[in-house]
Amino acid sequence: MNILLTSVGRRGYLVNYFKEALNGRGRVVGANMFSQAAGMIAADIAVVSPPANHADYIPFIADICKQYEIGLLCSLHDLDVYILSQNQQWLAEAGIAHTLPSAEWGRISLDKYECSTLLQSHGIAVPKTMVNLENALEAVRNGEMQFPLVVKARAGFGSLGLAKCNSETELETAYSAANTQALVSGSNHYLPLPEHEMVVIQQAITGREVCVGILNDFTGTYRAHFACEVHAMRSGESDWATSIEREPHTEMAKKFSKLTQHKGIWGVDFLQDGEIFRVIDVNPRFTGDYPFHHLAGAGAPQALISWAVSAEPPASCYSSTPGIQSFKDLVPTLAKNTR
């Protein structure tokens, strides 16, 4: 079976995880709009694709799937996930397994405000979140919110517009800057939002960051979850982390799984607020946190490959060992021609 990883970007390590799981029984095809990305170098076959929002993108990906007899497709970038999730019927018709969310969840997970509101309505804790600057300032003056506050693009990715504010002046400045960054990023071309509602304002939380990977099979049924504590970030994603005990997060993971009924692994980021873990981000894909789960023993790629051929994965795919500390290294690699 051949696997297609779209928007593969820098995730050469994930390409290698899939190649190891295939063990010579198939090839990994990497698609990306830039040819000399780490994931393209690592892939067995690399194809340069149009941008995800291009009119020819879906036909291009469909052609690649047919040309290379793809049996499993995973998207690795938020905006790419969104576009493919809105146009996925052809995958079912072609009999291609995939980890895309439903069209509804593709939209919800990209919209940080709507996602936060929905999770809260289902009993999953989130920070107090607002999208209107004047309402947020009023909430501060009424004691409903307290500084510091965090602002970030409502439909952003890679920490777009992220800033912490300690005063009304800082909040107004950061809100304006995040709004500008959101407009420049073009994210509103994917998810149209009113210009005065393109930034979310959240209550800042100073507790430790925990990332949970929630693994469902292709029927949307919960199979496992993995957890790590993040110690450092770089370029908008986790850079150094330690695997931790999973049990404290089991109830939440199963509740989340039942709510989304997603396929594959989703990454959910939490901040600890006293005894409560509050969701600050939902990523409907493999995230930059997954390597820390994998190095602790998780086997999501192997599980996905097994399910794609209607087989049961080894039980070891569902386990991870707490206390495994790991980090992302910079490894210079020779480039190769794109095929």
Image (spheres, rainbow, N blue to C red):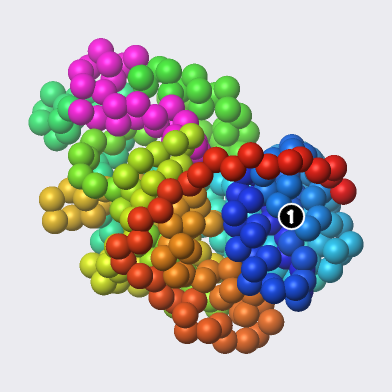
Q: Is residue 166 left or right of residue 313?
A: left
- What number of labels is visible? 1
Q: Residues within 10 Å of mark 1 (few under 14, many from 20)?
A: many
The residue under the point 61% across, 79% down is 307
287 shown above or below 153: below
- Residue 17: say if magenta: no
- Residue 167: say if magenta: yes
Decide which of 16, 86 is in the foreground and name it. Answer: 16
The local secondary structure at tag 1 comes to loop
Picture coordinates of residue 234, whole percent (x, y) = 44, 36
Q: In which quarter of the image is the N terminus?
A: bottom right
334 shown above or below 134: below
Picture coordinates of residue 282, whole percent (x, y) = 43, 52
- From the image, tell me which residue sits under label 1: 43
The residue under the point 30% across, 62% down is 323
- Residue type pointed to by label 1: Ala
Q: Is residue 50 left or right of residue 273?
A: right
The image quadrant that residue 99 belongs to is: bottom right
Stretch in magenta: 148-173
The image quadrant that residue 306 belongs to is: bottom right
323 shown above or below 183: below
The residue under the point 51% across, 27% down is 182
Picture coordinates of residue 186, whole percent (x, y) = 60, 29
Residue projecting furthest to the bottom: 311
Decide which of 147, 159 is in the foreground and name it. Answer: 159
Picture coordinates of residue 308, whole percent (x, y) = 66, 77
Q: Is residue 133 left or right of residue 308?
A: left
The residue under the point 43% across, 48% down is 327
